[in-house]
Structures are given as structure tokens and as C-alpha cells.
Image (cartoon, rainbow, N blue to C red):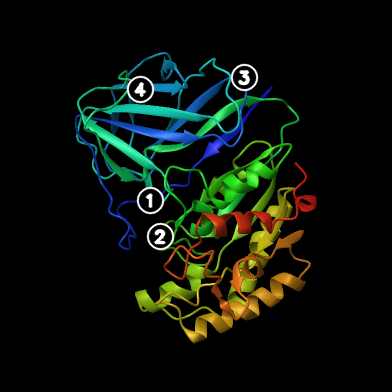
Amino acid sequence: MIWTAGFRTAVINPYDQFQLSEPRGFADQTVRQVLHLAGGGEAFRVRLTNRYGRTPLTIAAATVAVGQRQAALSFGGVDQYVVPAGEEILSDPVDLPVAGGTDLVLSLYLPEETGLATYSHRPAEFARMVDGNHVTSPALSRAAQVEGRFYISGVDVLAAPDTAIAVAFGDSWFEGVGTTTSANRRSVDFLNRRLERGWVVNQGIAGNRLLRDGVGEHALARFDRDVLSIPAVTHVLVHFGINDLVLPGMLGEPLPTADALIEGFTVLAGRAHAAGLKILGGTIGAFGGAPISTPEGLAVRRKVNDWIRTTDVFDGFFDVARAVANPQAPDHIHPTLDSGDGMHLNDRGAEAMADAVDLDNLTL
């Protein structure tokens, strides 16, 4: 048996200058979060993170519920733990079998002021919070809720030794912006429903870029941590480029050239291949209906997509752009697949994105 990723969520720094959602902290509060497993195993353990924290994080109590069963989490045999700033911890194993598609409900009691939380900012899932210690309460009455995941980076599962998994490494089109919140209708969720063996964990960050930091560390900077560190990974699917082409106008930066993006993708593919992984490149999705799109950015997108469709740098590609495009206006998302902002997919669009992946290229 091996420990591998049954669930992952990519986190960002709440102190970064540019934010697409409001960072927050906690004090004397229980935070309850639903973690939807991509894959399962005979037992599991939870990864908590204070990676970007500036003060130690005190966890006074923690539980996890699977259906009607609830278990207390311990860390090195103790129920309370302090996570130093900049570090992560792994809970002791919980001997409960879990299956892919299961929801784990994690409750953390944070008794002291935490400062701003290391978090996943647009995961299409709510966190609920209430004052006091209620980690064992079946329900949280009068709880506030906010989209986000806080202090969580993943769940490991104890799986068969021949388990193989893939990582969806990219931006909001993986993380799930535009899809129904708390419904598990992200493109990665739909892709997992197509797989008969193995699974895909989601390391998308809304606003993330291939070449430059901004919302989270850029792809080339976080590749080792968010992809290569995962045991049993054999494939990586990438979807980057939209934010490289729309954020410069908001941040007063120069627009990257098609050659620069192509070079970035080539470096990424080389690092995947050096680690023995297969890499599938996604064409850059349509964003022509967004107010922040520009003719220059769309022109670069078309050049890069032509390259992705014809290059042998990747082991295969999935043509997101064509799968979701409006045939009458190919730089735009089809109206039936558009979340309403011209830049993100609704549930049907996320399913179309997943269906664009040829499973012959994703043999796990």
C-alpha cells in the first residue's frame, strides 16, 4: 500500500499585493470545510498548512466526518498542535476507508487570533464558521459562510501500490470559477467521472499565470511543490495563458509574446518529462467576451493555440478552446457554456472542457 493524494487544493499568500478575493483570519472560531475526494483508500490523513502565515497557528481541536462517522484528528499523538509560520503538518492516519467521490467534513477550532490565513481563494466551495469550539457538533447553527478553503492543502489516502494519478495544474478553469458552488461541477470533477481507473487531483488557482507571480506563485515556480511532490503521479494536465494575457492590462505590465508563452510551456514540459511524467497541454480557453480582454491578447492566444495543436513538446493536447468556443465568434465562449462574465465556464462548459480530454492520452 502507498500513501498518495486523494485530494489537493493549491493555496496562495493572503499578503500578496494583488488579490481576487478578500483574505481573512480567525479567532476563537470553528471553521468547517468540505473536502471532496478525487480518489479513496483504506485510510486517510489530512494535510494542514501555515505556509504563508506570519504567526504560529494553534489548532486546539480538529475532527473529520465521513457520512455519519466522526473521528478526532491527532498530530503526532496529540489533539492540539501549533503549526509554525511557514510550515505544514500531516495528521495521524484515520483508519476509516473512503472512496473517490466521498465528502470529508473537516472542522478546526482556532482559539487564538490567526492573522491572515493561507488559503485557496476561489474553489467553488464554501467554508462555514461559528464562534467557539463546535468541532463535534453535527450542525453549525447560525454559521457564516464564505467561498474559500483555509489552512488545508490536501488529504492523503492509503491506496493500492499500483495506483496512478494525474494532476490538473492550471488556473480558474480547473479550480472551478463560474461553476455551481458546493456542487462539485468543476471540469476536474467531470473528468474524474469519466475515468475507470485512477483519478485527477485539482491544483488550479484562479488568476494564476504561467510566467509571472500575481495570484499565487507562477506555474514554473510552483511545479515542483504542487505536481512533482505527489506520490504516484504519472500525468499532468496544464491549462494556463488566460491570466498571462489579461492581467498585464490591469497591473500595468507588458503583454507577453507568443514566443515567451511557448518557451514557458516548453520548459514546463521538459521538467515533466525529466521526472518521468506525461504532460497534456490544454489550448488557451476563450475570453473574448470579458471586458478586460484586448485584441492584442487574443491575437497572442491564437498563435499559442496553433502551436499547442501542432507541437510534439506535449504528449498530447486537449482542445479546450474549440470545445467551448462560439462558432460564430471563436474568441468567445459559447453562450450556453458561459458563466455570464465572458471569461469563465458554467457547469455545462466545465463538462465540455472535461470531455475534450482524450482518455487514450490519460491511461492511469
Q: CA distance from mark 1 to mark 4?
A: 22 Å
Local crowd size for mark 2, using a 10 Å CA cut-off: few (<14), some (14–19), many (≥20): many
Mark 3 neighbour class, 10 Å CA radius: few under 14, some 14 to 19, many 20 or more: some
Q: Nearer the viewer, residue 216 or 130?
A: 130
* Residue 110 image offset from top left, x and y in percent: 26, 29
Question: Residue 200: percent from the left, percent from the top?
Answer: 63, 43
Q: Which mark is residue 130?
A: none
SS at badge 3: loop
Residue type of the residue flagged with mark 1: His
Residue at point 49%, 53% (across, down): 176
Horizontal side of residue 138 vs 264, given as left or right: left
Residue found at the very far bottom of the displayed protein: 295
Residue 161 is left or right of residue 302, and the answer is right
Marks 2 and 3, the one that precedes in the sequence:
3
Write down the residue under mark 3.
42
Marks 3 and 1, the one that precedes in the sequence: 3
Measure the alpha-carbon separation of dots 4 and 3. Answer: 21 Å
Residue sitting at 72 percent across and 32 percent down? 163
Quick one: label 1 or label 2, which is nearer the N terminus?
Answer: 1
Q: Which residue is mark 1?
A: 121
**Pointers 2 and 4 in contact (C-beta within 8 Å):** no
Frontmost of labels 2 and 3 is 3
Which disc, if any, is residue 62? Answer: 4
Determine the secondary structure under disc 2: loop
Distance between mark 1 and mark 2 Cα atoms = 10 Å
- Disc 2 target residue: 215
- Residue 114 pos. (x, y %): 24, 37
Q: Which amino acid, mark 2?
A: Val
Q: Quadrant of residue 158?
A: top right
- How far is the residue under mark 3 from the one under mark 1? 30 Å
Q: Nearer the viewer, residue 70 or 81?
A: 70
The image quadrant of residue 197 is top right
